[in-house]
Amino acid sequence: MRVHIADHPLITHKLTVLRDKATPSPVFRQLVEELVTLLAYEATRDVRVDKVVVDTPVAPYNGVKLARPRPIIIPVLRAGLGMLEGMTKLLPTAEVGFLGIKRNEETLEPYTYANRLPDDLTGRQVFIIDPMLATGGTLIDSIDYVFERGATDVTCVCLLGAPEGLAAVEAHVAGKDVKVVLGALDEKLNEKGYIVPGLGDAGDRLYGVAQ
Ligand code: URA
């Protein structure tokens, strides 16, 4: 597994405002979008392209265009939805699928409650977006889900990660072609499975408390 942890003052600045509990939802949403666009730049470093020749007003130019089949972006509901706009800004022609995975707040075990994805992901570059890599359970389930559908090239984009979760994902995917791009790697998980210092419940901060 390849891991990239962002090291950029603009990303740390925006994450600092996100972490602040006084930051209201509209500002939080805007910042998530901006952060994802910055992280997507790194996440799409290996996006597949085909060669193409265009004519500039002066001369032919040997360039590239995004290859087919189109990449697919999969936000993990609900918090991943807050990252979708930032990701599609950089990959406007990508297809979008949805995966609903929730964790049981007592056992911290994830379960899938919804999915809207093509059955066959063979040959597709897959970008899974989920703000918090906490225990790693949700990300592991999501990765398994897309590998079962034939994907072989998966990039996960998360705003924050915990060392425990990152290690769990790494152990699970072993030799598979998986890349994880993080805005920051935090200190640890607390006993409730929250990232410390983290930013709290990403879904609640984006959309308000779900009943
Ligand atoms: N999910 C969140 O929203 N926040 C955490 O800190 C951990 C998991």
Image: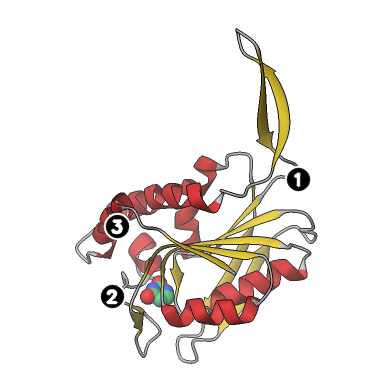
What residue is shown with label 2? Answer: 197
Q: Residue at x 70, y 59 (%)?
A: 117
Q: Point out the image quarter for the C terminus.
A: bottom left
Left or right side of 46 for 90: left
Q: Residue at x 50, y 85 (%)?
A: 104
Is 183 above or below relative to 211?
Answer: above
Nearer the observer, 29 or 159: 159
* Kind of residue sitting beneath label 3: Thr
Left or right side of 173 for 83: left
Nearer the observer, 22 or 146: 146
Left or right side of 10 for 141: right
Q: Is residue 203 visible?
A: yes
* Kind of residue sitting beneath label 2: Pro
Is 126 above or below relative to 134?
Answer: above
Image coords of residue 61 (percent x, y): 65, 20
Chain-order first, disc 3 or disc 2: 3
Chain-order first, disc 2 or disc 1: 1
Q: How far is mark 1 from mark 3, CA to CA?
A: 34 Å
What residue is shown with label 1? Answer: 69
Q: Quadrant of residue 131?
A: bottom left
Q: Which mark is residue 119?
A: none
Q: Point out the image quarter for the N terminus.
A: bottom right
What residue is shown with label 3? Answer: 12
